[in-house]
Image: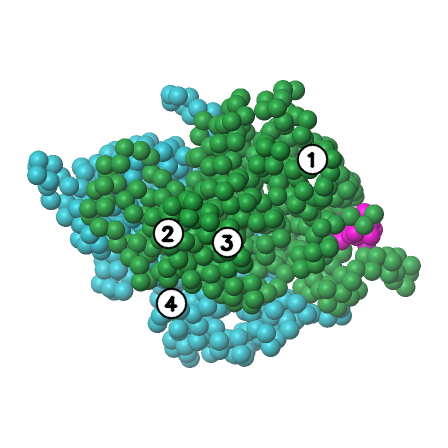
Chain colours: A cyan, B green
Amino acid sequence: MSNDQPPRPSRRGFLKAGGAAVAAGASLGAGLAASQAAQAATAKTAAHSADPQMAVEPFYGTHQGGIVTPQQSHTYVAALDLTTEKREDVIALLRAWTDAAARMTQGNTAAPLPAGGTAQAAQPADNLTDGNADSQAKNQSYSQAAKAAPDSGDVLGLGPCGLTITFGFGPGLFTKDGKDRYGLAARRPAALVDLPRFNGDQLIAQKTGGDLYIQACANDQQVAFHAIRQLSRLASGTAVMRWGQAGFVSGPRGQTPRNLMGFKDGTNNPSTAKPQLMNEFVWAGHTDDAPWMEGGTYTVFRRIRITLEHWDNTEVGFQEQVFGRHKYSGAPIGKKNEFDPVDLKEEDKDGNPVIPENSHVRLSNQASNNGAQILRRSYSYNDSTDFYIERWPPWRQETEYDAGLVFVAHQSDPRKGFIPINDKLAKFDMMNQFTTHVGSAIFAVPPGAKPGSYIGAGLFET
Amino acid sequence: MSNDQPPRPSRRGFLKAGGAAVAAGASLGAGLAASQAAQAATAKTAAHSADPQMAVEPFYGTHQGGIVTPQQSHTYVAALDLTTEKREDVIALLRAWTDAAARMTQGNTAAPLPAGGTAQAAQPADNLTDGNADSQAKNQSYSQAAKAAPDSGDVLGLGPCGLTITFGFGPGLFTKDGKDRYGLAARRPAALVDLPRFNGDQLIAQKTGGDLYIQACANDQQVAFHAIRQLSRLASGTAVMRWGQAGFVSGPRGQTPRNLMGFKDGTNNPSTAKPQLMNEFVWAGHTDDAPWMEGGTYTVFRRIRITLEHWDNTEVGFQEQVFGRHKYSGAPIGKKNEFDPVDLKEEDKDGNPVIPENSHVRLSNQASNNGAQILRRSYSYNDSTDFYIERWPPWRQETEYDAGLVFVAHQSDPRKGFIPINDKLAKFDMMNQFTTHVGSAIFAVPPGAKPGSYIGAGLFET
């Protein structure tokens, strides 16, 4: 990647002119690193064997990245509340976010560094991109710069790391406290419902809701967090942070990763390799109330704490009854292999269901939910420990893990997806003994942007 | 790795008989995975180029691992409080911890799985070690097991990931509330002082202190956390969790990593490649009051929150004055390269010091501290966000990042290391505007164990 931002008109032209190779991340100043990155991105798609630090995901396109993108190893998701009363401030923010996100996903700093900056891409031949060797003279010019640092600089040398940045709109963008702040109330999609209160919800206000959503996913925790830090700073004066949440997934390569409960998570997801499934279950179609959402999706976030100490003290056999799957193989109970189909009708010799009535797999299965499916793209979280005071016997007051699941699910319509599925789970799932939903949010995630435009342009400009 | 735990006497014999190759992690049931792991460990030592998932670090030895071990990418550190009044319970716990830690660092589960378990090592040729293919019959036997799962199983297939586990003893092991609970009061080392209250400390009880310390470091966050989960569970009835803290470091390969402030961190550490420096500054020598600590070290933990939002709004030039180093190169101010020596006497043309009086580099430098050095082995932490109420103008009440530094420093005597250095920093360091110490602890970390013995045997048995 080059140090200086290429002139924007040329860059736009280049991006417009290009096809897959451009989408995969080559930039105008295409030197060694950009070529390597593009190759890495291609190789990754093909074989998942490339250096994850050098992976590059496209930013512009029909859909936003980070939805059907193969899951990166880390995430940082955040919600902000708008503090401005001006529609044009919101548009300006979305423009600034779009430009910064396009830069960062391609391995650049959020804004050009003043005295010849440095891209994130590791590039031994270029002293700047390894973040090591700017000269004393350059440092002095930084010292003289009369404004805040254009980028926190903490990921210099780390590479693009397959970063995707996904933006979404919460109900508060359309109406807040009964006020139509930005003239958008009539454009709110019917599918962007306020989530109902589910059984057992113990939602914390500071981890729930939000007017704007940013989801950064990358093959490195600091790269994901870096993106949120820069975008949050760009919102200064327009929006404030409501909550942020780091997450990770530790997967054996090429296998379904295990969550912190030790079970494989995501086995029964609809295949992102099947466009017809994505069109049916993930991408929003054309609707008269919100034509600007076509090609977008609706994203539900839940912060689900798991009392791992209690879970770890249960028998494996019990754990398998809770999930409805075998722990080590991931197979449905009674089956041998992870991807064996879930047979909800199978009974044992006494006529009892092999997969228990209140098991997670049965309750969340498509067949139990009128064919509904959602695309889960969840991460584990580990926010260390906190001091908890239990409200039930034996009234423990103790330090416990603040760890669990950053549940993220994308769907074409949450009224047919997350809401009925979770309603059932909240009432009957045996897993509820160990899980507590403490954060929740829903967002309309618009389609991708065209180069030169910005995320959400369809909402504001059509 | 074999599925069944090898008979212990043979295993001991094997470990005793072996040299470096054994220390590097080959186990008795040395199949394909163990050979691969040993090769990987060797390769890593030689060139840092091996698969970080397959790296294996020795557990038994003169010193505990995780001190001069090349820093892994992730950590989970935890402190527990002893609840038992019986000396033999403490010994039994240390024995159990030693055995489980030896197993886990070598890529095995904390305890053998009942029906033929599975090692962590990824091994395509072995259906068990990839965590996929246990049979239905085996699953049923798990279901019939009448006790809690022997291991949470969440890292099956992830590999040893260079895991090290380091144990330490807090002041409360020796005396608590004036009571000599375990007959150890007279054996408390003079160097294990209670840390003084430093300027600006805002310590939170639930993140401070602790009778026992466990530090797990690995090239994967879930592997580090997994180790703490299993060890904490083994302490049931003897000790309870006081605090836990996850951390990470995102480094460009082969370079000094940057902390969340965007500066390289650890440049001026004493070189672990120089045994005489380690003997002088890191390893405890023989002392009459605590001969059992010879070959151990004293570890100071501080949880240092950084208000990144505020930091990100400052100029790079100002940030460099705070650190005393250039941001991008890592060079001392006025110098060109990261490893150029820090010249505290240099003055500019007006006679002012080039490295500011109250900069972090000057105040923490060996030359400012009577030659004292400590071995910092710190990680960044990112516990998402919290709602903060500031106690000074402009009285902000807002969601902020709960992120910063898991400061971990090892030293031969904290009275000559951390305490005088931090006393100076706490009073004068310009960085204090952005940092708050919210957690703190000090531990005596005993030397390594011999196979068949346990960590801390010297304290209890000599």
Q: Quadrant of the C terminus of chain B?
A: top right
The quadrant where residue A273 appears? bottom left
Distance Cα–Cα, label 3 vs label 1: 30 Å
Judge the density around disc 2: few (<14), some (14-19), many (≥20) Cα neighbours within 10 Å.
Answer: many
Q: Position of residue B206 (x, y in %)?
A: 56, 31
Same subunit, labels 4 and 1: the answer reads no
- Residue type (three-letter) at the residue carrying disc 2: Ala
| Label pair 3/1, CB-CB below 8 angstroms | no
Judge the density around disc 3: few (<14), some (14-19), many (≥20) Cα neighbours within 10 Å.
Answer: few
Q: Which residue is mark 4?
A: A48
- Residue type (three-letter) at the residue carrying disc 4: His
Q: Position of residue B171 (x, y in %)?
A: 64, 30
Q: Which residue is mark 2?
A: B119
User: Which one is earlier in the sequence, the residue at label 3 or at label 1?
Assistant: 3
In the picture provided, is A275 more to the left or to the right than A150?
left
Distance Cα–Cα, label 3 vs label 4: 41 Å
User: Which one is earlier in the sequence, the residue at label 3 or at label 2?
Assistant: 3
Distance Cα–Cα, label 1 vs label 2: 38 Å
Q: Nearer the viewer, mark 1 or mark 2?
A: 1
- Secondary-structure class at tag 2: loop
In the picture provided, is B436 more to the left or to the right than B162?
right
In which chain is the residue bearing label 2?
A: B
Image height check: is A190 above or below A434? below
Distance Cα–Cα, label 3 vs label 2: 23 Å
- Secondary-structure class at tag 4: loop
In which chain is the residue bearing label 4?
A: A
The stretch of residues the image draws in magenta is: B356-369
Q: Position of residue A378 (x, y in %)?
A: 37, 50
Q: Which residue is mark 3?
A: B17
